[in-house]
Structures are given as C-alpha cells and as structure tokens.
Amino acid sequence: MSTEADLHMMQLSDSLFPTGLFAVSGGIETMFLQKKMATAGELREFLKTVISQQLGPCDCVMLANAHRSTGRDEIIELDSVCHSMRTNKEVREASCRSGSQLARCVAGFLASDMLEWYCSMLGSKKTSGEYPVSFGVCCRVMGIKTERALGMFLYGYVASSVGAALRLGMIDHMEGQEVIHALKPLISETVSENCKKPASEAWQFAPQAEIYQMVHEGTDAKMFIT
C-alpha cells in the first residue's frame, strides 16, 4: 500500500472520524444493566461470538463484495440484502446512519464519481447506506485493500464495544486493552475466512446479541443507541 493509502486507513480508523460508532453498544448496555455481563472476560467472550457468528459471515462478506464490486447495481443489491439481514430495528437504523454519514463525510474531502453516485442514491433513498457496504465503497475509493478494510472494520467494532464497556464502568482501561489484544488472532482469522466469499454465502446467527438488542430497543432510559 502507498503512504497515502496508509494515511487514509489511519483517518478512517481514528476515533475522531464522525461515524457515530461511539454511541452504540450492540446490546452490551442491556446485558450489563441486567447483570448478564460484568467482567472483561465475559465481554471478550461476547465479542468473540458476535465476530464469528455475525460480523464475520455477514458484515465482512458484504463489505468485501462491495469493495471489489465494479457494478453499481450490485452495490445496491448488496445493501438491500445486508439491510434485510438486520433483525433489530434499532441496530438496522444505527447501521444506516453510520454508513450514510461515513460516505457523505468521505465525499466531502475526496472527489470520486463512485462516491458522488453513492451519495445521490442515499439522498434519493434508493439505497439505505448499510455501514458494511458503505465502508467497502469508501475503502475501495481510498485505495485501501480488502483485507485491510475488513481488519479496520472489525477493529472498529471491538474498540467501540470496549469504549462502551468503559463508559458503563464495567472494565478499566487496562482491561480494555487486554480485551482488544486478545481478539487480534480472531480478527485476523475472520478476515482470512471471509475476504473472498461471494455474497450468496453470507449468513449470521447470534441470538443472544439480538435478544438483548431487542430488549434495549424498548428501554426508556439508556446511554447508547443500541
């Protein structure tokens, strides 16, 4: 990769990048409040399940296919399929908000016919802007390779989840870094397993996460969107 592509990768990975991921917990808030998760070890095991059963076989597959797609109709189709696989309204809406914000932000500083078209599809509501698909499109335009894009995507999920646990008072900063480090091998393995799969092989099955996300949706007082 070129130095410029490396810098693009650092920019998208920075917590300052305004995608809104800091406002999601993916069900962690509900689990913590209901005393179903209280330690760094329990958080790590939960994240392992989500990565291997949901983000890897679904989000990563969609992201990789969007990244290598040369057809605009295919990108719209990938977004539609990804959207249909979100069983929880709160998570679905959060994914679309983050994806739309990502694309519009990148289009604001990087000239690209693809991004201009994609943002026009978002504006006309012809695509929903699912975060994995938007992330794949943006990474391709910025010259970030598929494997790096998947690694960034999964790392972003882990980092935002650890951040949520920190703000909930579940873990401290040292424990948070230990969780991130412990998940590096799984992230690498998940990238390798899913970077070349066709979209037709996408699937997900993480009922525990989805149940607590559904419970979170009906909660009146909450710190996070999901």
Image (cartoon, helix red, strand yellow):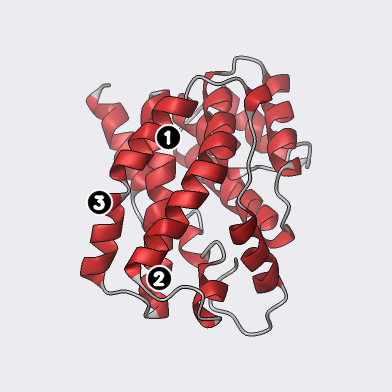
Cβ atoms under marks 2 and 3 closer than 8 Å = no
Q: Earlier in the sequence, mark 3 or mark 1?
A: 3
Reading the image, the residue beneath label 1 is: 190
Using the numbered discs, state the Cα–Cα distance from disc 2 to disc 3 in whole angstroms: 16 Å
Using the numbered discs, state the Cα–Cα distance from disc 3 to disc 1 in whole angstroms: 15 Å
Q: Position of residue 96 (x, y in %)?
A: 65, 49
Q: Is residue 182 left or right of 84 when viewed as pictured? A: left
Cβ atoms under marks 3 and 1 closer than 8 Å = no
Q: Position of residue 131 (x, y in %)?
A: 58, 44
Instruction: For mark 1, give the secondary structure.
Output: helix
Reading the image, the residue beneath label 2 is: 165
Amino acid type of disc 1?
A: Thr
What's the residue at 70%, 48% (across, down)? 86
Q: Is residue 208 left or right of 112 when viewed as pictured? A: right
Instruction: Decide: is 6 above or below 86.
Output: above
Residue 17 seen in render: no
Instruction: For mark 2, give the secondary structure.
Output: helix
Q: Earlier in the sequence, mark 2 or mark 3?
A: 2
Amino acid type of disc 2?
A: Ala
Amino acid type of disc 3?
A: His
Q: Which quarter of the figure has residue 216?
A: bottom right
Residue 181 badge: 3
